[in-house]
Image (tube, grey):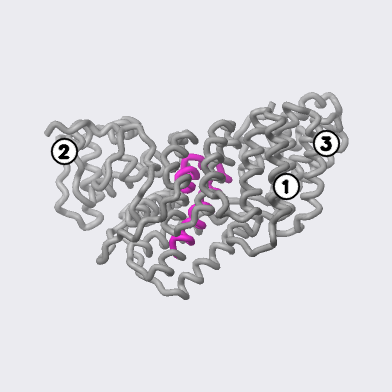
Amino acid sequence: MGREPNTRLADLFALTGWSKGELARMVNRRGAALGQQQLSTDTSRVRRWIEQGETPRDPVPRVLAALFTERLGRVVTTEDLGLERHRRSRSGTSDTGMPWKPERTAAVLTEFTGMDLMLNRRGLMSAGAALAAGSVIADSLHDWLAGDAATPPDLRSSGRPPLVIPAGDSSLDLYEAGPVGDEEVTALERSVGVFRSWDASRGGGLQRKAVIGQLNEVGGMLTYRHPPERERRLWNVAANLAVLAGWMSHDIGLEPTAQKYFVIAVHAAREAGDKPRAGEALSRAARQMVHLGRADEALDLMRLAKAGSGERALPRTRAMLHTIEAWAQASLGHSQATRRVLGEAEELFAADSGEVGPSWMQLFTEAELHGMEALVYRTLAEHDPAASALAQQHARLAISLRPEQGRERSNVFDYLSLASACWIAGQPEEAQVQAKMALALIRDTSSLRTWDRLREMYRLTQRYQGLPEVAELREEIRQADPRQRWQIV
């Protein structure tokens, strides 16, 4: 037929260690469990999928996605396998480009969450996948976010929605959500606030599964036609839940999964006609990049996030975006740029009129501003020690402004920023006090990011390990880590 090989499927197939005959037999068994007795996949058919790029008929792509997900221990969608009939991306490219049609966004959202829940249920981790480069994501989304084009009209066709793969057992029961009314949408909007509070308090590990399950259901709802305003609200809920799912995934170390959710959130925000929400979703991806030591790529994302939000965003939103850009600049040791961008963030925050903003900005309070400034200056202090005094100042302000209950994870970060700045400034006695405060709180969170930051602080104690009390603190930190996943120097 002259078709090109399906390199996506070939690459993932090579990772499984299966033979073509094994895969054919598993497809037939799984299909039979679904009641699809007519499936008769054989070795030659699997070969055509891989070598000739032949796309099997439904439900085989969904069955393959489930089998690969289970085998590889990470979410694998039909698009990852190169088996989407409506759009076949070029080999090796990131499937993030605009525009997606509304029905495609809903289908990707629902399939990905369903597979993620399947892994969550089995206790598997998202491993073996690579993060897309920040520049790749920024380039693919640039035309919509930075341009003036309005959101296109609804292109969804009416009628029965496509079947999707749900969270479930190995039999892959198929699930279909139905259309909803305004009261149900209001309840969904309230649930986002509840999940957001849980995450802010204890970290992403405790409620991630519930958030993904809710997002999966919203994706199913969006395969139906709704009145325009109700549909816009549903897309807003989807964007908010996708950001939260991504942030929770990042918080517990599921980095490729987190990035996928952030990209899905951008597409959902597009359907809602909300560019500032899309920009904030990109800023989360940028924070993830800085955390992972890829500050250059974070700057690519932040340039687009700021350009896309533009004057549409409230001053407080723009202030938040500036603090993330400053963190990336600080990670690169750009002292002048860091101070300039943070100064702009303070001016924007002060210019905020108090107008009630979107729900996703409610947590960016004055305490959060100072907490981010403390983190930025603490990061810069490793390149410019003079910044440590400013880091301490802002960390103390953040701690004084935060409530004792409800923001435990942020309090841990504040104490770690303060302790780190004290170590850098040559104040080991004060550093020990703040480090112990962080250690006392960290056990109550399910956030791996807090342990990552603790490790960064621990590294700074090395020059003082000859002091008996510091040696004792270092041992206490080593014993405190319940996972023992990282080796402390």
Residue beneath the point at 51% across and 71% down:
187
Q: Give the amino acid at mark 1.
A: Glu
Residue beneath the point at 76% across and 57% down:
404
Residue 308, percent from left and from top: 51, 47
How would you rate the neighbour count of disc 2 (Cα within 10 Å): few for under 14, some for 14-19, many for 20 or more? some
Residue beneath the point at 33% across and 62% down:
223
Would residue 263 be visible to someone looking at this image?
Answer: no
Figure check: 351 above or below 6: below
Magenta highlight range: 234-262
How would you rate the neighbour count of disc 1 (Cα within 10 Å): few for under 14, some for 14-19, many for 20 or more? some
Q: Give the amino acid at mark 2.
A: Arg
| Residue picked out by circle 2 | 45
Query: Mark 3 and mark 1 in contact (Cβ < 8 Å)?
Result: no
| Residue picked out by circle 3 | 389
Residue 165, percent from left and from top: 33, 55
Q: Give the amino acid at mark 3.
A: Ala
